[in-house]
Image (cartoon, rainbow, N blue to C red):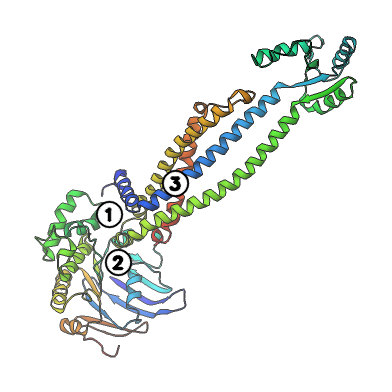
Amino acid sequence: MRRYNIFYFIGQAFTNLWRNGLMTFVSIAVLMSLLVVIGGFSLMVVNIDINLKKFGEMNEIVVFVDREASEEKIEEIGNTIKALDNIEKDSSGNVTGVTRISKSEGLRQLKQENPGVYDDITDENNPLPDKFVITYEETAKVPELDYQLRQIEGIIKVNNRLDLATGIENLKNGIMLIFVWFLIILFVVSLFIIVNTIKLSVFARKDEISIMRYVGATRSFISLPFIFEGIIIGVISSVIAYFIEWFLYAYVERMVVSDYLQMIDVLTFDDVSKYVLFGFLAIGILTGVVGSSISLGKYSNK
Amino acid sequence: MIDFKNVKKAYPNGTMALKGIDLHVDDGEFVFICGHSGAGKSTIIKLLLREERISSGELIVDDYDLSKLSNYRVPQYRRKLGVVFQDFRLFPKKTVYENVAFAMEVIGTPRRDINKRVPSILRTVNLAGKENSLPNEISGGEQQRVALARALANNPSIIIADEPTGNIDPKMSLEIMQLLLKINKLGKTVLVVTHEKGLVDYYQQRVVSLQNGRIVDDKVGGMYNEKV
Protein backbone atom coordinates (compact mmCIF):
# COMPACT_ATOMS: atom_id res chain seq x y z
CA MET A 1 0.00 0.00 0.00
CA ARG A 2 1.21 3.50 -0.66
CA ARG A 3 0.20 6.75 0.98
CA TYR A 4 -1.27 9.31 -1.35
CA ASN A 5 0.71 12.41 -2.01
CA ILE A 6 -1.05 15.60 -0.95
CA PHE A 7 -0.37 17.02 -4.42
CA TYR A 8 -2.65 14.36 -5.90
CA PHE A 9 -5.60 15.75 -3.92
CA ILE A 10 -4.65 19.36 -4.64
CA GLY A 11 -4.37 18.53 -8.35
CA GLN A 12 -7.82 16.93 -8.32
CA ALA A 13 -9.21 19.95 -6.47
CA PHE A 14 -7.83 22.38 -9.07
CA THR A 15 -9.27 20.24 -11.87
CA ASN A 16 -12.73 20.43 -10.25
CA LEU A 17 -12.47 24.18 -9.70
CA TRP A 18 -11.45 24.71 -13.32
CA ARG A 19 -14.34 22.53 -14.53
CA ASN A 20 -16.89 24.67 -12.61
CA GLY A 21 -15.21 27.95 -13.50
CA LEU A 22 -18.21 30.25 -13.14
CA MET A 23 -19.35 28.90 -9.78
CA THR A 24 -15.76 28.97 -8.55
CA PHE A 25 -15.53 32.62 -9.53
CA VAL A 26 -18.83 33.43 -7.79
CA SER A 27 -17.77 31.58 -4.63
CA ILE A 28 -14.48 33.42 -4.48
CA ALA A 29 -16.19 36.77 -5.12
CA VAL A 30 -18.76 36.26 -2.36
CA LEU A 31 -16.33 34.91 0.21
CA MET A 32 -13.91 37.70 -0.64
CA SER A 33 -16.68 40.30 -0.07
CA LEU A 34 -17.49 38.70 3.27
CA LEU A 35 -13.85 38.94 4.31
CA VAL A 36 -13.47 42.55 3.18
CA VAL A 37 -16.58 43.53 5.18
CA ILE A 38 -15.40 41.60 8.25
CA GLY A 39 -11.96 43.18 7.94
CA GLY A 40 -13.38 46.68 7.44
CA PHE A 41 -15.68 46.46 10.45
CA SER A 42 -13.01 44.89 12.63
CA LEU A 43 -10.47 47.58 11.80
CA MET A 44 -13.07 50.26 12.45
CA VAL A 45 -13.86 48.79 15.87
CA VAL A 46 -10.16 48.46 16.76
CA ASN A 47 -9.51 52.09 15.82
CA ILE A 48 -12.53 53.31 17.78
CA ASP A 49 -11.26 51.39 20.78
CA ILE A 50 -7.85 52.99 20.54
CA ASN A 51 -9.37 56.46 20.40
CA LEU A 52 -11.69 55.70 23.29
CA LYS A 53 -8.68 54.64 25.31
CA LYS A 54 -6.93 57.84 24.33
CA PHE A 55 -9.87 59.91 25.56
CA GLY A 56 -9.85 57.93 28.76
CA GLU A 57 -6.15 58.52 29.29
CA MET A 58 -6.42 62.28 28.79
CA ASN A 59 -8.42 62.68 32.03
CA GLU A 60 -8.87 66.37 31.38
CA ILE A 61 -11.78 68.75 31.69
CA VAL A 62 -11.64 72.20 30.18
CA VAL A 63 -13.76 75.01 31.67
CA PHE A 64 -14.32 78.39 30.02
CA VAL A 65 -14.70 81.58 32.01
CA ASP A 66 -17.11 84.41 31.28
CA ARG A 67 -15.45 86.93 28.90
CA GLU A 68 -16.58 89.81 31.13
CA ALA A 69 -15.00 88.35 34.27
CA SER A 70 -12.38 90.57 35.96
CA GLU A 71 -8.86 89.38 36.70
CA GLU A 72 -9.80 89.05 40.41
CA LYS A 73 -12.87 86.99 39.55
CA ILE A 74 -10.80 84.66 37.37
CA GLU A 75 -8.29 84.24 40.22
CA GLU A 76 -11.17 83.44 42.57
CA ILE A 77 -12.58 80.86 40.16
CA GLY A 78 -9.13 79.25 39.92
CA ASN A 79 -8.90 78.98 43.69
CA THR A 80 -12.40 77.53 43.97
CA ILE A 81 -11.50 74.87 41.43
CA LYS A 82 -8.28 74.03 43.28
CA ALA A 83 -10.29 73.47 46.45
CA LEU A 84 -12.49 70.81 44.83
CA ASP A 85 -12.12 67.08 45.34
CA ASN A 86 -10.69 64.77 42.62
CA ILE A 87 -8.18 67.34 41.29
CA GLU A 88 -4.70 66.00 40.60
CA LYS A 89 -2.21 66.68 43.41
CA ASP A 90 1.50 65.91 43.83
CA SER A 91 2.85 63.62 46.56
CA SER A 92 2.99 66.46 49.10
CA GLY A 93 -0.63 67.41 48.52
CA ASN A 94 -0.11 70.49 46.35
CA VAL A 95 -2.67 70.93 43.58
CA THR A 96 -1.01 70.41 40.18
CA GLY A 97 -4.08 69.64 38.10
CA VAL A 98 -5.32 73.20 37.39
CA THR A 99 -3.71 75.24 34.64
CA ARG A 100 -4.99 78.61 33.59
CA ILE A 101 -4.75 79.48 29.94
CA SER A 102 -5.44 83.15 29.43
CA LYS A 103 -7.26 84.35 26.35
CA SER A 104 -4.04 85.78 24.86
CA GLU A 105 -2.23 82.49 25.55
CA GLY A 106 -5.18 80.64 23.96
CA LEU A 107 -4.91 82.83 20.86
CA ARG A 108 -1.17 82.23 20.63
CA GLN A 109 -1.71 78.46 20.81
CA LEU A 110 -4.43 78.66 18.18
CA LYS A 111 -2.19 80.62 15.83
CA GLN A 112 0.64 78.12 16.38
CA GLU A 113 -1.58 75.15 15.57
CA ASN A 114 -3.10 76.81 12.50
CA PRO A 115 -0.46 79.02 10.93
CA GLY A 116 -1.87 81.84 8.79
CA VAL A 117 -5.52 81.17 9.60
CA TYR A 118 -5.99 83.59 12.50
CA ASP A 119 -3.44 86.26 11.55
CA ASP A 120 -6.07 89.02 11.52
CA ILE A 121 -7.08 88.37 15.14
CA THR A 122 -5.16 90.39 17.71
CA ASP A 123 -5.38 90.74 21.48
CA GLU A 124 -7.76 93.67 20.94
CA ASN A 125 -10.39 91.72 19.02
CA ASN A 126 -9.62 88.31 20.58
CA PRO A 127 -13.00 86.56 21.08
CA LEU A 128 -11.57 83.69 23.14
CA PRO A 129 -12.44 83.44 26.84
CA ASP A 130 -9.95 82.50 29.54
CA LYS A 131 -9.97 78.79 30.37
CA PHE A 132 -8.75 76.32 32.97
CA VAL A 133 -7.46 72.88 32.00
CA ILE A 134 -8.23 70.57 34.89
CA THR A 135 -6.60 67.16 35.33
CA TYR A 136 -8.62 64.86 37.53
CA GLU A 137 -7.62 61.78 39.47
CA GLU A 138 -10.58 59.39 39.25
CA THR A 139 -12.64 58.88 36.11
CA ALA A 140 -15.51 57.41 38.13
CA LYS A 141 -16.01 60.69 40.00
CA VAL A 142 -16.05 62.85 36.85
CA PRO A 143 -19.84 63.39 36.79
CA GLU A 144 -19.64 64.80 40.35
CA LEU A 145 -16.71 67.08 39.49
CA ASP A 146 -18.50 68.15 36.33
CA TYR A 147 -21.56 69.13 38.41
CA GLN A 148 -19.48 71.07 40.96
CA LEU A 149 -17.69 72.98 38.18
CA ARG A 150 -20.99 73.97 36.60
CA GLN A 151 -22.11 75.42 39.96
CA ILE A 152 -19.18 77.88 40.11
CA GLU A 153 -20.29 81.36 39.19
CA GLY A 154 -18.44 82.81 36.18
CA ILE A 155 -17.89 79.44 34.43
CA ILE A 156 -19.80 79.50 31.14
CA LYS A 157 -18.91 76.11 29.72
CA VAL A 158 -17.54 72.78 30.91
CA ASN A 159 -15.98 70.52 28.24
CA ASN A 160 -16.08 67.07 29.59
CA ARG A 161 -14.55 64.54 27.16
CA LEU A 162 -16.41 61.68 28.85
CA ASP A 163 -19.51 62.74 26.93
CA LEU A 164 -17.62 62.34 23.70
CA ALA A 165 -16.21 59.02 24.85
CA THR A 166 -19.69 57.77 25.77
CA GLY A 167 -20.99 58.91 22.39
CA ILE A 168 -18.24 57.07 20.59
CA GLU A 169 -18.78 54.01 22.77
CA ASN A 170 -22.46 54.00 21.76
CA LEU A 171 -21.49 54.43 18.14
CA LYS A 172 -19.11 51.50 18.47
CA ASN A 173 -21.85 49.31 19.95
CA GLY A 174 -24.21 50.29 17.12
CA ILE A 175 -21.58 49.45 14.54
CA MET A 176 -20.91 46.13 16.26
CA LEU A 177 -24.59 45.23 16.11
CA ILE A 178 -24.80 45.98 12.37
CA PHE A 179 -21.51 44.17 11.91
CA VAL A 180 -22.75 40.97 13.57
CA TRP A 181 -25.88 40.89 11.39
CA PHE A 182 -23.89 41.58 8.25
CA LEU A 183 -21.51 38.87 9.23
CA ILE A 184 -24.22 36.28 9.76
CA ILE A 185 -25.98 37.08 6.50
CA LEU A 186 -22.78 37.16 4.45
CA PHE A 187 -21.52 33.99 6.09
CA VAL A 188 -24.72 32.12 5.25
CA VAL A 189 -24.68 33.41 1.66
CA SER A 190 -21.01 32.47 1.22
CA LEU A 191 -21.59 29.05 2.66
CA PHE A 192 -24.61 28.49 0.42
CA ILE A 193 -22.67 29.42 -2.71
CA ILE A 194 -19.61 27.37 -1.79
CA VAL A 195 -21.84 24.40 -0.96
CA ASN A 196 -23.42 24.67 -4.41
CA THR A 197 -20.10 25.04 -6.19
CA ILE A 198 -18.72 21.94 -4.58
CA LYS A 199 -22.01 20.08 -5.07
CA LEU A 200 -21.55 20.70 -8.80
CA SER A 201 -18.10 19.11 -8.60
CA VAL A 202 -19.48 16.21 -6.64
CA PHE A 203 -22.31 15.78 -9.14
CA ALA A 204 -19.94 15.96 -12.12
CA ARG A 205 -17.89 13.17 -10.55
CA LYS A 206 -20.87 11.14 -9.34
CA ASP A 207 -19.97 8.05 -11.39
CA GLU A 208 -16.33 8.30 -10.47
CA ILE A 209 -17.26 8.52 -6.79
CA SER A 210 -19.58 5.53 -7.03
CA ILE A 211 -16.87 3.43 -8.71
CA MET A 212 -14.39 4.55 -6.07
CA ARG A 213 -16.80 3.42 -3.38
CA TYR A 214 -17.47 0.04 -5.03
CA VAL A 215 -13.79 -0.78 -5.37
CA GLY A 216 -13.15 0.09 -1.73
CA ALA A 217 -11.70 3.62 -1.73
CA THR A 218 -11.80 5.06 1.76
CA ARG A 219 -14.06 7.91 2.72
CA SER A 220 -11.12 10.25 3.21
CA PHE A 221 -9.69 9.38 -0.20
CA ILE A 222 -13.01 10.30 -1.82
CA SER A 223 -13.56 13.41 0.28
CA LEU A 224 -10.13 15.00 0.35
CA PRO A 225 -10.14 16.50 -3.18
CA PHE A 226 -13.42 18.28 -2.32
CA ILE A 227 -12.11 19.45 1.04
CA PHE A 228 -9.06 20.84 -0.74
CA GLU A 229 -11.39 22.51 -3.21
CA GLY A 230 -12.97 24.37 -0.28
CA ILE A 231 -9.56 25.23 1.14
CA ILE A 232 -8.36 26.60 -2.19
CA ILE A 233 -11.47 28.77 -2.53
CA GLY A 234 -10.82 30.01 1.02
CA VAL A 235 -7.15 30.78 0.42
CA ILE A 236 -7.67 32.57 -2.90
CA SER A 237 -10.53 34.65 -1.44
CA SER A 238 -8.43 35.54 1.62
CA VAL A 239 -5.43 36.69 -0.35
CA ILE A 240 -7.49 38.84 -2.73
CA ALA A 241 -9.50 40.24 0.20
CA TYR A 242 -6.25 41.11 1.99
CA PHE A 243 -5.02 43.27 -0.87
CA ILE A 244 -8.42 44.94 -1.32
CA GLU A 245 -8.54 45.67 2.43
CA TRP A 246 -5.04 47.08 2.26
CA PHE A 247 -5.99 49.42 -0.57
CA LEU A 248 -9.26 50.53 1.08
CA TYR A 249 -7.65 51.00 4.47
CA ALA A 250 -4.83 53.09 3.04
CA TYR A 251 -7.45 55.31 1.37
CA VAL A 252 -9.47 55.75 4.59
CA GLU A 253 -6.28 56.31 6.58
CA ARG A 254 -5.22 59.14 4.24
CA MET A 255 -8.69 60.65 4.53
CA VAL A 256 -8.83 60.46 8.34
CA VAL A 257 -5.32 61.73 8.92
CA SER A 258 -6.17 64.97 7.16
CA ASP A 259 -5.99 68.48 8.62
CA TYR A 260 -9.54 68.36 9.88
CA LEU A 261 -9.37 65.09 11.74
CA GLN A 262 -5.95 65.25 13.31
CA MET A 263 -7.39 64.51 16.73
CA ILE A 264 -8.21 60.92 15.67
CA ASP A 265 -5.51 58.28 15.98
CA VAL A 266 -5.46 55.69 13.22
CA LEU A 267 -3.44 52.46 13.19
CA THR A 268 -1.35 51.99 10.07
CA PHE A 269 -2.07 48.91 7.96
CA ASP A 270 1.42 47.63 8.78
CA ASP A 271 0.41 47.48 12.45
CA VAL A 272 -2.47 45.14 11.72
CA SER A 273 -1.56 43.48 8.40
CA LYS A 274 -0.53 40.12 9.82
CA TYR A 275 -3.70 39.87 11.96
CA VAL A 276 -5.80 40.75 8.91
CA LEU A 277 -4.08 38.15 6.74
CA PHE A 278 -4.21 35.34 9.29
CA GLY A 279 -7.76 36.24 10.28
CA PHE A 280 -8.85 36.17 6.64
CA LEU A 281 -7.10 32.86 6.01
CA ALA A 282 -8.66 31.31 9.10
CA ILE A 283 -12.20 32.43 8.23
CA GLY A 284 -11.74 31.68 4.52
CA ILE A 285 -10.40 28.18 5.04
CA LEU A 286 -12.96 27.38 7.73
CA THR A 287 -15.82 28.48 5.47
CA GLY A 288 -14.40 26.43 2.61
CA VAL A 289 -13.97 23.29 4.68
CA VAL A 290 -17.42 23.54 6.26
CA GLY A 291 -18.92 24.16 2.80
CA SER A 292 -17.16 21.09 1.36
CA SER A 293 -18.22 18.87 4.22
CA ILE A 294 -21.86 19.90 3.82
CA SER A 295 -21.70 19.33 0.03
CA LEU A 296 -20.29 15.85 0.37
CA GLY A 297 -23.12 14.84 2.70
CA LYS A 298 -24.68 11.65 1.44
CA TYR A 299 -21.78 10.73 -0.85
CA SER A 300 -19.40 10.21 2.00
CA ASN A 301 -21.94 8.60 4.30
CA LYS A 302 -22.20 5.23 2.62
CA MET B 1 -19.02 -17.72 1.33
CA ILE B 2 -22.25 -15.78 1.29
CA ASP B 3 -24.91 -16.54 3.86
CA PHE B 4 -28.35 -14.90 4.02
CA LYS B 5 -30.32 -16.06 7.08
CA ASN B 6 -33.94 -14.97 7.16
CA VAL B 7 -32.93 -11.59 5.76
CA LYS B 8 -35.65 -8.96 5.57
CA LYS B 9 -35.32 -5.54 4.08
CA ALA B 10 -37.84 -2.75 4.42
CA TYR B 11 -37.21 0.67 2.88
CA PRO B 12 -38.12 3.86 4.72
CA ASN B 13 -41.16 4.34 2.43
CA GLY B 14 -42.57 1.08 3.77
CA THR B 15 -41.76 -1.13 0.79
CA MET B 16 -40.87 -4.62 1.97
CA ALA B 17 -38.24 -5.58 -0.63
CA LEU B 18 -37.09 -8.83 0.95
CA LYS B 19 -39.46 -10.87 3.08
CA GLY B 20 -37.15 -13.42 4.68
CA ILE B 21 -34.41 -14.71 2.39
CA ASP B 22 -32.35 -17.82 3.18
CA LEU B 23 -29.54 -18.33 0.73
CA HIS B 24 -26.17 -19.97 1.10
CA VAL B 25 -23.49 -19.65 -1.60
CA ASP B 26 -20.24 -21.53 -1.16
CA ASP B 27 -16.84 -20.24 -2.23
CA GLY B 28 -16.27 -20.81 -5.94
CA GLU B 29 -19.94 -21.26 -6.84
CA PHE B 30 -21.60 -19.76 -9.93
CA VAL B 31 -25.15 -18.56 -9.29
CA PHE B 32 -27.76 -16.92 -11.47
CA ILE B 33 -30.23 -14.76 -9.55
CA CYS B 34 -33.41 -14.31 -11.58
CA GLY B 35 -36.70 -12.58 -11.21
CA HIS B 36 -38.89 -9.81 -12.58
CA SER B 37 -38.63 -6.14 -11.65
CA GLY B 38 -39.48 -5.64 -8.02
CA ALA B 39 -38.64 -9.25 -7.12
CA GLY B 40 -35.77 -8.10 -4.87
CA LYS B 41 -32.72 -8.70 -7.12
CA SER B 42 -31.41 -5.13 -6.84
CA THR B 43 -31.94 -5.14 -3.08
CA ILE B 44 -29.81 -8.26 -2.79
CA ILE B 45 -27.03 -6.49 -4.68
CA LYS B 46 -27.38 -3.36 -2.53
CA LEU B 47 -27.17 -5.43 0.63
CA LEU B 48 -24.13 -7.34 -0.64
CA LEU B 49 -22.41 -4.06 -1.55
CA ARG B 50 -23.41 -2.73 1.87
CA GLU B 51 -25.11 0.22 0.23
CA GLU B 52 -28.10 -0.67 2.36
CA ARG B 53 -28.31 -2.39 5.70
CA ILE B 54 -30.55 -5.39 6.35
CA SER B 55 -33.65 -4.71 8.48
CA SER B 56 -33.50 -8.06 10.25
CA GLY B 57 -31.87 -11.47 9.98
CA GLU B 58 -28.20 -12.14 9.36
CA LEU B 59 -25.98 -11.60 6.35
CA ILE B 60 -22.44 -12.89 6.39
CA VAL B 61 -20.00 -12.48 3.50
CA ASP B 62 -16.66 -14.21 4.06
CA ASP B 63 -15.68 -13.07 7.54
CA TYR B 64 -17.85 -9.97 7.54
CA ASP B 65 -21.16 -9.80 9.38
CA LEU B 66 -22.83 -7.06 7.33
CA SER B 67 -25.50 -6.36 9.94
CA LYS B 68 -22.76 -5.23 12.31
CA LEU B 69 -20.22 -3.84 9.86
CA SER B 70 -19.26 -0.25 10.76
CA ASN B 71 -19.07 2.41 8.05
CA TYR B 72 -15.36 2.68 8.75
CA ARG B 73 -14.77 -0.95 7.67
CA VAL B 74 -16.98 -0.84 4.58
CA PRO B 75 -14.14 0.13 2.15
CA GLN B 76 -12.03 -2.76 3.42
CA TYR B 77 -14.99 -5.14 2.92
CA ARG B 78 -15.74 -3.87 -0.58
CA ARG B 79 -12.22 -4.75 -1.68
CA LYS B 80 -13.33 -8.38 -1.48
CA LEU B 81 -15.97 -7.72 -4.14
CA GLY B 82 -15.79 -6.96 -7.84
CA VAL B 83 -18.84 -5.36 -9.40
CA VAL B 84 -19.97 -5.22 -13.02
CA PHE B 85 -22.92 -3.05 -14.05
CA GLN B 86 -25.26 -3.22 -17.01
CA ASP B 87 -24.18 0.26 -18.13
CA PHE B 88 -20.41 -0.48 -17.77
CA ARG B 89 -19.72 2.81 -15.88
CA LEU B 90 -16.36 3.40 -17.53
CA PHE B 91 -14.64 6.77 -17.52
CA PRO B 92 -14.92 8.07 -21.08
CA LYS B 93 -11.74 10.14 -20.87
CA LYS B 94 -9.59 7.35 -19.49
CA THR B 95 -8.04 4.67 -21.66
CA VAL B 96 -8.82 0.98 -21.18
CA TYR B 97 -5.59 0.65 -19.20
CA GLU B 98 -6.36 3.70 -17.04
CA ASN B 99 -9.91 2.53 -16.34
CA VAL B 100 -8.60 -0.74 -14.94
CA ALA B 101 -5.65 0.86 -13.15
CA PHE B 102 -7.99 3.39 -11.51
CA ALA B 103 -9.55 0.69 -9.30
CA MET B 104 -6.11 -0.14 -7.99
CA GLU B 105 -4.96 3.47 -7.69
CA VAL B 106 -7.82 4.52 -5.45
CA ILE B 107 -7.00 1.89 -2.86
CA GLY B 108 -3.35 2.91 -2.86
CA THR B 109 -1.75 0.04 -4.81
CA PRO B 110 1.89 0.83 -5.63
CA ARG B 111 2.50 1.83 -9.25
CA ARG B 112 4.85 -1.08 -9.97
CA ASP B 113 2.16 -3.57 -8.86
CA ILE B 114 -0.40 -1.80 -11.06
CA ASN B 115 1.96 -1.96 -14.03
CA LYS B 116 2.44 -5.67 -13.48
CA ARG B 117 -1.18 -6.64 -12.83
CA VAL B 118 -3.19 -4.59 -15.34
CA PRO B 119 -1.70 -6.19 -18.52
CA SER B 120 -2.24 -9.63 -17.02
CA ILE B 121 -5.94 -8.92 -16.29
CA LEU B 122 -6.42 -7.44 -19.73
CA ARG B 123 -5.08 -10.69 -21.19
CA THR B 124 -7.53 -12.66 -19.02
CA VAL B 125 -10.47 -10.77 -20.50
CA ASN B 126 -9.02 -10.91 -24.02
CA LEU B 127 -8.29 -7.19 -24.29
CA ALA B 128 -4.54 -7.35 -24.87
CA GLY B 129 -3.65 -4.72 -27.48
CA LYS B 130 -6.56 -2.43 -26.55
CA GLU B 131 -4.77 -0.76 -23.62
CA ASN B 132 -4.62 2.67 -25.19
CA SER B 133 -8.14 2.73 -26.64
CA LEU B 134 -10.80 4.97 -25.20
CA PRO B 135 -14.16 3.39 -24.28
CA ASN B 136 -15.90 5.02 -27.27
CA GLU B 137 -13.37 3.41 -29.62
CA ILE B 138 -14.31 -0.16 -28.65
CA SER B 139 -17.51 -2.23 -28.90
CA GLY B 140 -20.13 -2.66 -26.15
CA GLY B 141 -18.91 -6.18 -25.44
CA GLU B 142 -15.36 -4.94 -25.14
CA GLN B 143 -16.48 -2.15 -22.82
CA GLN B 144 -18.14 -4.72 -20.60
CA ARG B 145 -14.92 -6.72 -20.63
CA VAL B 146 -13.07 -3.59 -19.46
CA ALA B 147 -15.61 -3.30 -16.63
CA LEU B 148 -15.00 -6.96 -15.83
CA ALA B 149 -11.25 -6.36 -15.84
CA ARG B 150 -11.75 -3.44 -13.48
CA ALA B 151 -13.85 -5.65 -11.20
CA LEU B 152 -10.98 -8.16 -11.14
CA ALA B 153 -8.28 -5.58 -10.59
CA ASN B 154 -8.12 -5.86 -6.82
CA ASN B 155 -8.30 -9.65 -6.90
CA PRO B 156 -11.70 -9.95 -5.17
CA SER B 157 -13.06 -13.28 -4.00
CA ILE B 158 -16.61 -12.50 -5.20
CA ILE B 159 -17.77 -11.06 -8.53
CA ILE B 160 -21.24 -9.53 -8.65
CA ALA B 161 -22.56 -8.89 -12.14
CA ASP B 162 -25.77 -6.86 -12.35
CA GLU B 163 -27.42 -7.58 -15.72
CA PRO B 164 -23.98 -7.75 -17.37
CA THR B 165 -25.40 -8.59 -20.78
CA GLY B 166 -28.30 -6.14 -20.71
CA ASN B 167 -26.63 -3.58 -22.99
CA ILE B 168 -24.85 -5.81 -25.46
CA ASP B 169 -25.82 -8.03 -28.40
CA PRO B 170 -26.38 -11.81 -27.98
CA LYS B 171 -23.00 -12.83 -29.45
CA MET B 172 -21.17 -10.48 -27.09
CA SER B 173 -23.40 -11.72 -24.24
CA LEU B 174 -22.08 -15.24 -24.76
CA GLU B 175 -18.52 -13.91 -24.69
CA ILE B 176 -19.13 -12.15 -21.40
CA MET B 177 -20.73 -15.27 -19.94
CA GLN B 178 -17.75 -17.36 -21.08
CA LEU B 179 -15.47 -14.92 -19.34
CA LEU B 180 -17.51 -15.04 -16.14
CA LEU B 181 -17.30 -18.84 -16.20
CA LYS B 182 -13.56 -18.63 -16.84
CA ILE B 183 -13.23 -16.29 -13.85
CA ASN B 184 -15.35 -18.70 -11.78
CA LYS B 185 -12.99 -21.53 -12.73
CA LEU B 186 -10.14 -19.42 -11.38
CA GLY B 187 -11.79 -19.87 -7.97
CA LYS B 188 -13.95 -16.77 -7.69
CA THR B 189 -17.54 -16.88 -6.51
CA VAL B 190 -19.73 -15.37 -9.25
CA LEU B 191 -23.26 -14.01 -8.80
CA VAL B 192 -25.02 -12.99 -12.00
CA VAL B 193 -28.28 -11.10 -11.70
CA THR B 194 -30.17 -11.45 -14.94
CA HIS B 195 -33.55 -11.99 -16.52
CA GLU B 196 -32.19 -13.36 -19.81
CA LYS B 197 -33.81 -16.76 -20.06
CA GLY B 198 -31.65 -17.87 -23.01
CA LEU B 199 -28.40 -17.44 -21.14
CA VAL B 200 -29.65 -19.03 -17.95
CA ASP B 201 -30.99 -22.05 -19.81
CA TYR B 202 -27.88 -22.39 -21.93
CA TYR B 203 -25.37 -22.46 -19.09
CA GLN B 204 -27.42 -24.56 -16.65
CA GLN B 205 -25.77 -23.35 -13.47
CA ARG B 206 -27.36 -22.91 -10.06
CA VAL B 207 -30.45 -20.72 -10.52
CA VAL B 208 -32.08 -18.83 -7.65
CA SER B 209 -35.50 -17.43 -8.57
CA LEU B 210 -37.03 -14.54 -6.67
CA GLN B 211 -40.61 -13.38 -6.56
CA ASN B 212 -42.03 -10.58 -4.42
CA GLY B 213 -39.07 -10.56 -2.09
CA ARG B 214 -38.96 -14.32 -1.55
CA ILE B 215 -36.92 -17.17 -3.02
CA VAL B 216 -39.36 -19.39 -4.85
CA ASP B 217 -36.90 -21.70 -6.53
CA ASP B 218 -33.25 -22.68 -6.01
CA LYS B 219 -31.86 -25.43 -8.27
CA VAL B 220 -28.35 -26.48 -9.24
CA GLY B 221 -28.22 -27.07 -12.99
CA GLY B 222 -31.60 -25.42 -13.22
CA MET B 223 -33.41 -23.51 -15.92
CA TYR B 224 -35.03 -20.12 -15.94
CA ASN B 225 -38.26 -20.33 -13.94
CA GLU B 226 -40.80 -18.73 -16.23
CA LYS B 227 -43.37 -18.47 -13.49
CA VAL B 228 -41.36 -15.63 -11.95
SS at circle 1: loop
Q: Quadrant of residue A117?
A: top right
Marks 2 and 3, how far apart at CA: 52 Å
The quadrant holding residue B167 is bottom left
Instruction: Return the chain for callout 3.
Output: A
Of the image marks 2 and 1, the number of the one nearer the N terminus = 2
Location of residue B66 with respect to A110 vertically, above or below: below
Which quarter of the picture shows residue A170? top right
Asked whether B65 or B196 is in front, the reply is: B196
Q: Same subunit under labels 2 and 1?
A: yes
Name the element at disc 2.
loop
Q: Where is residue B218 in the image (x, y as percent from the top left)?
A: 27, 84
The reply to whether residue B187 is in sight is no
In the rendered image, residues at marks 1 and 3 fall on the same chain: no
Front residue of B180/A282: it is: A282
Asked whether, in this view, residue A113 is left or right of residue B49, the answer is right
Instruction: Quickly name the residue at label 1.
Output: B106
Amino acid type of disc 3? Ala
Mark 1 or 3: the one toward you: 3
Above or below, comparing residue A110 to residue A24 in the picture:
above
Is the residue under label 3 in contact with that under label 2 (CB below 8 Å)?
no
Residue A17 lies left or right of residue B174; in this view the side is right
- Provide the residue designation for mark 2: B62
